[in-house]
Image (spheres, rainbow, N blue to C red):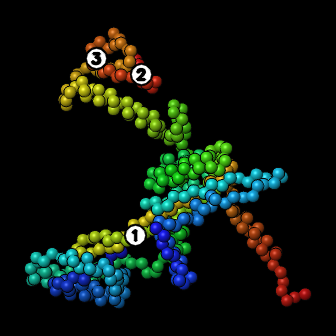
Amino acid sequence: MAALVVVFSPLPRLRGLLQRCWGRLERGLLPGFSGGHSLPWGPALAVQAPAFFPQPVNNTSESNEASGLLDSILWMAAPKKRRTIEVNRCRRRNPNKLIKVKRNIDVCPECGNLKQKHVLCGYCYAKVKAETRLIRMEIHKKEGGPFNAPTVETVVLYDGEKPTEKDEGKRIIERARKRPSWFVQN
Amino acid sequence: RWLASSSLFPLSCIHTSTSLQKSGKWEKKNRIVYPPQLPGEPRRPAEIYHCRREIKYSKDKMWYLAKLIKGMSIDQALAQLEFNDKKGAKVIKEVLLEAQEIAVRNHNVEFKSNLHIAESMTGRGRYMKRIRYHGKGMFGIMKIVRCHYFVKLVEGPPPPPEPPRTGFDQAKEYVQQLRSRTLVNTL
């Protein structure tokens, strides 16, 4: 939570505007705290406003800005009273703000982890993703660089599998492990 | 690293211990030992108190998750938290799994699914104040917010949720109140 504090700039160009703002603060029209913290004034004052505006241009812009600010300050919405903790609690604990209980969680029949009904099981998906990554690494080793993808289909063969007559013209990727149960061979 | 707590004047400062040596009351609740039960008494369900301190999350945001799992069985709570997108859900899930592990190992709980969440609460951790730099040399003071999370697991199935108070119940209670008034200073 940040509380905005208006910083005094000792430069004479903005002094008139800031004095008016500060006067309004003191009278309590703008929400803010007068005589804020003594400690952070130091580093804040170290940062200066840019010093390259010419005087006459700034005067007119300043007066325009001041009158605009005067008008807009009177129309700005501000809270009238502090919201009590009871009112705050009523708003924060309203049933529409509480987290709803999800009723669409099931058990994955493959691995037994929990899954949402309309979403793939996270564990099984991670398993498939890891195996796909290894297959892609094999493909990368075979291709040896970008833009070398052949125009034929690819077939993945595991330990002890021979290419059938259907896989005649296809590119063969070898994986040195047993075929996983979920990767069905055609 | 022994730090002197208020020894000169008893009411000068109550919270003098720093985080290094403070041992929370919630952790001590696990240490109470009941006398052995008599043969005729009903079995006292096991209670496991667990907490995690100084979680980098807001206590108000964590409260919604704590309210979600209050009164659920531990399996249901873990399921709900797994598919919740909030940052605190992951933390609370870890805390619940740790507590389940402690229950099975140290507190003689037979079935790890036979636990339900009796209490789950959040508390405010230590806040730090930092400067947040705005434009034009303005600054704000921001709070770096941390929270604690407390959970009490009790053995046994979760208690049935109590039915919501209807208008009829409220009317009955009102009539009961009127009937139980006594007349003062009369015969």
Residue B179, given in percent of the width and then of the height, sits at 82, 75
Q: Nearer the viewer, residue B167 or B49?
A: B49
Mark 2 vs mark 3: tell me if same chain: yes
Chain to which the residue tagged by mark 2 belongs: A
Residue B118, given in percent of the width and then of the height, sits at 64, 56
Q: Residue at x 57, y 47 (%)?
A: B101
Residues under labels 2 and 3: Cα distance? 19 Å
**Residue B67 seen in render:** no
Q: Nearer the viewer, residue A72 or A181?
A: A181
* Circles 3, 1 touching at the beta carbon (< 8 Å): no
Instruction: Answer with left or right where residue A92 lies relative to residue B166.
Output: left
Instruction: Report the number of discs.
Output: 3
Residue B124, given in percent of the width and then of the height, sits at 49, 67
**Around disc 1, counting alpha carbons within 10 Å, would you say few (fewer than 14), some (14 to 19), or many (20 or more)?**
few
Q: Residue at x 38, y 15 (%)?
A: A161
Residues under labels 1 and 2: Cα distance? 55 Å
Where is mark 2, residue-wise? Answer: A179
**Around disc 2, counting alpha carbons within 10 Å, would you say few (fewer than 14), some (14 to 19), or many (20 or more)?**
some
Chain to which the residue tagged by mark 3 belongs: A
Name the secondary structure under disc 1.
strand
Where is mark 1, residue-wise? Answer: B128
